[in-house]
Image: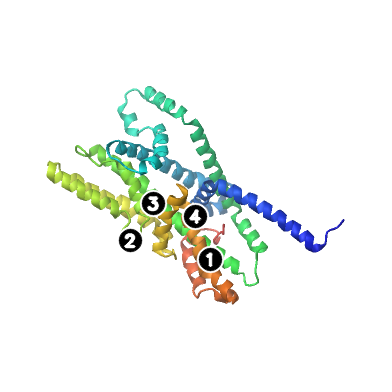
């Protein structure tokens, strides 16, 4: 017996609700993997646009991920593991209070990664390798899960690079309106996500890696003491770079004052604090900011809201909150700025704030300059 049209529509809507709930459950279960994949997509997208005209979408997406996304993950992951080791040593000398329970899982896993200085000082590299293997056996399930999630994140980034335009076109055609208001909203969100992910967070990761390398090298030539916990301080500097205006100065200025004070009080040579300040300002502060400034300068978000998103995100969601917090901020901010006035007033596309299209063009300029084939923004 054929159902009436209304019943058929209700049945299909029930199917849509069930499938939507399943999809939402999957996304919620692996939300960290998906937001990491989204971040890797924005990291690799400028390189993908350069390679696409020469190599095609498949090769260009794979090459961009191998050239940018994979090294970023490996370098940052290894650096964070070393910093966790140093945090564990700090914990044994200083009471961290309630932070101890939250940091304990990360401190345990960090034991798998050996400090490079230990390998350099150990004359028997074979024994050192056996030590690494024995320590790693106890964490095979954790490491295996991490590798699977990393593979899934890279797969998400790959298919967003290759099929991002098709996905954006499908969304626009499926949920289109007469004024193409959805397209404007998607483009604004995409532009600011590119600036937040590729600009701010990648800048923080670059600072972490560069600062760790610079501080470890300085410690090789430093007098007694050197820089305490160099990798941990580098991570703090990278995190502080997300704070507007002052940024990583919150970390390296007090550290420089401490190094100068120690040199004066203990009679250490003054050249080391001076070299520390010069190396930090030039290699850690100035150069990363200069390279990534074009991708940050186009941001149209309130700096206070961005800072709150970076702080609240990890507190609410864990490690992936660093990516999920800004994502929610961008989506909610532009919904309130563009869509909510239309819903309240019902004025249509003319309710878009004046200058939105002009702001879109300004934010898209850095990525358009990187594209040889003139491809525009790819909504996610």
Residue that badge 2 annotates: 245
Residue 190 position within the rendered picture, expressed as x and y whole percent measured from the top left: 52, 60
Residue 19 position within the rendered picture, expressed as x and y whole percent measured from the top left: 67, 51
The residue under the point 33% across, 40% down is: 87
Q: Earlier in the sequence, mark 3 or mark 1?
A: 3
Q: Earlier in the sequence, mark 3 or mark 4?
A: 4
Q: Can residue 370 be seen? A: no
Q: Earlier in the sequence, mark 2 or mark 4?
A: 4
Residue that badge 4 annotates: 46
Instruction: State left or right for residue 256 relative to residue 71.
Output: left
When the figure is inspected, residue 18 is found, relative to residue 107, above or below; the finding is below
Instruction: State left or right for residue 313 relative to residue 176.
Output: left
SS for tag 3? helix
Distance of label 3 from label 4 (alpha carbons): 18 Å
Distance of label 3 from label 2 (alpha carbons): 14 Å
The residue under the point 49% across, 35% down is: 142
Label of residue 204 in the image: 3
Label of residue 335 in the image: 1
């Amino acid at each position: 017996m054929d159902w009436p049209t209304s019943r058929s529509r209700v049945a299909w809507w029930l199917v849509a609700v069930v499938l939507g709930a399943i999809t939402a459950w999957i996304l919620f279960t692996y939300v960290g993997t998906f937001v990491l994949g989204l971040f890797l997509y924005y990291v690799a997208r400028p390189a993908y646009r350069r390679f696409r005209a020469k190599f095609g979408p498949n090769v260009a997406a794979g090459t961009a991920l191998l050239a940018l996304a994979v090294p970023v993950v490996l370098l940052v992951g290894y650096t964070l593991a070393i910093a966790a080791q140093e945090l564990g040593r700090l914990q044994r000398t200083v009471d961290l209070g309630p932070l101890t329970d939250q940091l304990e899982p990360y401190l345990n896993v960090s034991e798998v990664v050996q400090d490079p200085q230990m390998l350099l000082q150990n004359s028997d590299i074979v024994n050192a390798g056996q030590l690494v293997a024995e320590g790693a056996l106890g964490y095979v399930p954790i490491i295996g899960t991490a590798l699977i999630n990393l593979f899934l994140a890279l797969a998400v980034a790959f298919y967003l690079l290759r099929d991002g335009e098709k996905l954006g076109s499908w969304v626009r055609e499926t949920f289109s309106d007469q004024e193409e208001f959805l397209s404007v909203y998607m483009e604004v969100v995409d532009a600011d996500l590119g600036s937040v992910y590729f600009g701010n967070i990648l800048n923080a990761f670059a600072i972490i890696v560069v600062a760790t390398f610079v501080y470890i090298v300085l410690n090789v030539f430093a007098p007694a003491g050197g820089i305490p916990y160099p990798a941990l301080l580098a991570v703090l500097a990278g995190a502080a770079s997300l704070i507007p205006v002052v940024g990583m100065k919150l970390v390296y200025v007090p550290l420089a004052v401490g190094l100068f004070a120690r040199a004066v009080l203990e009679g250490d040579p003054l050249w080391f604090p001076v070299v520390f300040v010069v190396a930090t300002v030039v290699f850690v502060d100035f150069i990363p900011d200069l390279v990534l400034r074009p991708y940050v300068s186009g941001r149209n978000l309130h700096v206070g809201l961005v800072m709150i998103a970076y702080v609240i995100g990890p507190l609410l969601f864990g490690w992936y909150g660093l990516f999920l917090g800004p994502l929610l901020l961008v989506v909610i901010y532009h919904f309130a700025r563009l869509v909510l006035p239309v819903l309240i007033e019902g004025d249509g596309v003319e309710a878009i704030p004046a200058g939105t299209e002009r702001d879109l063009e300004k934010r898209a300029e850095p990525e358009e300059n990187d594209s040889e084939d003139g491809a525009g923004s790819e909504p996610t």
